[in-house]
Image (cartoon, rainbow, N blue to C red):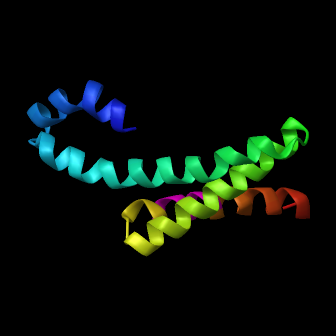
Amino acid sequence: TLLNVVVVDLGPASRVHGYSRAEQLRDVAPIAAVSMCAAACSFPLLLLGVPAAVILLLQVCVFVAVFLLLSRLLGLEGASDVRRALESVLGVIVGRVRGR
C-alpha cells in the first residue's frame, strides 16, 4: 500500500485532488506500519511444522487480530473499515449456511 502511494498515486493525486504528498504519506504510513507489525506477528507461525493449510488459517487469524487490535489502540480509521468488511463477509457466510 505504501509503495503504491509513493510510486503510483502520489503525483496524480496531488495534481487532480490537491492532496499533498505529505498528507498522503501521513494518511497511509500508520496503516502500512500496522500491517507490517501484523505480518511480523504472523510470520513465525511458519515454524510450527504443521500442514500449509493450517498455517495459512492461523496466519490469517493472527494477522486480522493484530491488525484490528493495533488499529483500534491507535485510533486508526482503517480498523472500522476492516471490521465492517469482515462483518459483511461473515454475514454472507452465515446467511448461506442458514439457507437465507
Identify the residue at image location x=91%, y=38%: 51
Please provide percent x and percent y for residue 87: 64, 64
Total count of labels: 0
Q: In this view, does 68 lie above or below 20?
A: below
In this orientation, does residue 84 appear?
A: no
Reply above or below: 46 against 26.
above
- In the image, the segment drawn in magenta is 80-86
In the picture as drawn, the residue positioned furthest to the front comes out as 47
Q: Quadrant of the C terminus?
A: bottom right
- The answer to whether one can see residue 72 in this image is yes
> In the rendered view, does 1 fall on the left or right side of 90?
left
Q: In the image shown, does 9 or 28 lie closer to the viewer?
A: 28
- Judge whether residue 75 is colored magenta: no
Query: Horizontal placement of 55 versus 39: left or right?
Result: right
Q: Quadrant of the N terminus?
A: top left
- Left or right: residue 82 compared with residue 95: left
Task: In the displayed orientation, state which residue is furthest to the top.
Answer: 7
Q: In the image, is residue 83 part of the stretch drawn in magenta?
A: yes
User: What residue is shown at x 84% (from left), y 56% (from top)?
Assistant: 96
Question: Residue at left 34%, top 55%?
Answer: 30
Q: 3 or 80: which is nearer to us?
A: 3
The residue positioned 78% from the left and 42% from the top of the image is 47
**The quadrant where residue 24 appears:** top left
Residue 30 vs residue 20, the one in the foreground: 30
Pick the front one: 53 or 100: 53
Q: Position of residue 2 (x, y in %)?
A: 35, 38
Assign the magenta stretch its main secondary structure.
helix
Coordinates of residue 98 in the picture (x, y in percent):
90, 64
- Residue 54, image quadrant: top right
